[in-house]
Amino acid sequence: MKILVTGGTGYIGSHTVVELIEAGYEVEILDNLYNSQKSVLDTIEELTGVKPKFHEVDLRDAEALAGVFQDSNFDAVIHFAGLKAVGESVEKPLEYYENNVGSTINLLECMQEFGVHKIVFSSSATVYGEQDTPQYVETMTTGVTISSPYGWTKYFIERMLMDVAKSDPDFEVTILRYFNPVGAHPSGLLGENPNGKPNNLMPFVMKVATGEIPELSIFGNDYPTPDGTCLRDYIHVVDLAKGHLAALNHLQKGTQVYNLGSGKATSVLEIVKAFSEVSGRLLPHKIVARRAGDLPEFFADPSKAERDLDWKTELGIADAMRDTINYLQKSRGMEI
Ligand code: NAD
Ligand code: UFG
C-alpha cells in the first residue's frame, strides 16, 4: 500500500513515517519545509533503511500538487501538513485559513481528480472548545466555543471532509483528534525540532534544558486543579504515530472520528517534576500570569479508539521525558 504523507518531515509526521515503513508501507512525503528540515529524511533512512521519496511542494500550489499525484499511484493520504501555532493564528488568521483550509481544498480536489479516496486527518482536541466536563468524548458538540483561528481551521477541515465523504460515497475519511503530543523516538535520533519560536510546553522545557532560555514560565498556578497548574492529556508521539497505522487499517466508507489520547490528566508542575527526576537536575521554572485562552483541564475519553481501532497508549509521562532527554543528548548536543 502506497501512502502520501503530507507534513511528513514534521514532528508527528516523521514519527508516523517510521512506523509506516516498519509496518511495510511504501511512503512518499510531501512538505514545504516551513517548520521542518530535510535532514529528517536521512534520519528516517538511518532508522528504517528506507529513504522515502520526497516532494518539496507547498500544498497551496495546486499545479505542483497535481504533478505529485500524476506521477504516483497513492492508495491513501495521511494529512499532517499545516500551521499549528495557536497564538500566531490569532494575529494572522488569514494565513491560517489559507494555509490550512486552502491547502486541504487543493488536496481533496487532487484526490478526487486522481481517484484517491482514503484520508486520515490530523485534527485536535481544540475543536471541542470549552465543555461542561473536562473529559472529551467524540459525541460532544464541537465548534461552539473554539478559542482560536487555528482551532476553527481544524473544525472547518473536519466539516469539509465530512461533506466530501457525504457527496462522494467512495470516500473513506478518518479524523483523529490529538490531545497533547510529547516525547521523541526511543533511538534519540528523531524528535520535535521546530523552526523559530516554539509554542507548546515541551519545546520550551527542552530549551530550558539546553540552556537556550534560563527558566520555564509556568502560566498560572491559581487554577482550580490539585496543584493550581493546568491539566492536560499528554500522549507519547510514538503511541500517536501507531494510532495512525490503526486508523489506516480500519478505514471504511464515510467518516469516522477518534480521540487519540491517554485518558489521563497531568499538570504542568508534574511535567516539570517528571523531567527533573529523569534528568537528575531540577528544571528551573517560575510562575507567571495565566496565558489567555488556556482551559484549566481537559483530557480524552479514548475508549472509542480502543474499541474500534484496537489501539491504546502504551507509554507514559516518564517514557516521554526519558525519550525527550535521550533525543536532546543524542541529536541536539545537550550534556547532562
Ligand atoms: P509540524 O509543524 O512539526 O509539522 C507540520 C509540517 O507541515 C511541517 O513540516 C511543515 O513544514 C509542513 N507544512 C505546513 N504548511 C505546509 C504547506 N502549505 N505545504 C506543505 N507542507 C506544509 O507539526 P506537528 O506537531 O507534527 O503537527 C502535525 C499536525 O498535527 C498539524 O496539522 C497539527 O495542527 C496537528 N496537531 C498537532 C498537535 C501538537 O501539539 N503538535 C496537536 C493537535 C494537532
Ligand atoms: N505552558 C506553560 N508554559 C509554557 C508553555 C505552556 O505553563 O511555556 C502550559 C500551558 O499554559 C498549558 C500547558 O502548559 O497549561 C500545555 O500547553 P501547550 O501549549 O503545550 O498545549 P495546549 O494544551 O495549550 O494546546 C493544545 C494543542 C493545540 C490545541 C490546544 C487547545 O497543542 O494544538 O491544545 O486544545 F489547539
Image (tube, grey):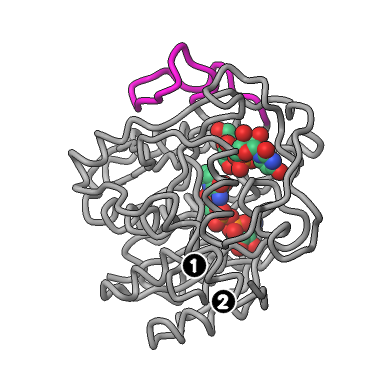
Q: Indicate the position of residue 64 as horizontal and vertical percent values.
A: 61, 68
Q: Is residue 101 magenta?
A: no
Q: Residues within 10 Å of mark 2 (few under 14, many from 20)?
A: many
Q: Residue at x 56, y 76 (%)?
A: 40
Residue 40: mark in rendering: 2
In-image side of 120 versus 110 (left or right): left
Judging depth in this view, the residue of 12 and 174 nearest the camera is: 12
Image position of 232 with respect to 278: above or below? above
Can residue 152 be seen by looking at this rendering?
A: yes
Tell me the quarter of the picture where residue 10 sits: bottom right
The reply to whether the magenta stretch includes residue 145 is yes
Q: Is residue 62 left or right of residue 141?
A: right
Q: Which residue occupies 33% across, 58% down?
A: 242
Q: Which secondary structure is most common in the magenta stretch?
A: loop
Residue 101 is left or right of residue 1, and the answer is right
Comes first in the chain, label 2 or label 1? 1
- Establish whether ligand 1 lies closer than 8 Å to the Cβ of label 1: yes
C-alpha distance separating marks 2 and 1: 7 Å
| Residue placed most toward the observer, 104 or 305 | 305
- Residue, disc 1: 14
- Residue 290: image location, x then y, percent: 74, 26
Question: What range is drawn magenta here?
Answer: 128-148
Contact between marks 2 and 1 (CB within 8 A): the answer is: yes
> Which quarter shows the C terminus?
bottom right
Residue ID at (49%, 25%): 128
Density class for disc 1 (Cα within 10 Å; few <14, some 14-19, many ≥20) is many
Seen in the picture, residue 224 relative to 88 is either above or below; the reply is above
On the image, the x and y values in percent for residue 156 come to: 54, 32
Amino acid carrying mark 1 in the image: Ser
Residue type, mark 2 in image: Val
Q: Secondary structure at mark 2?
A: helix
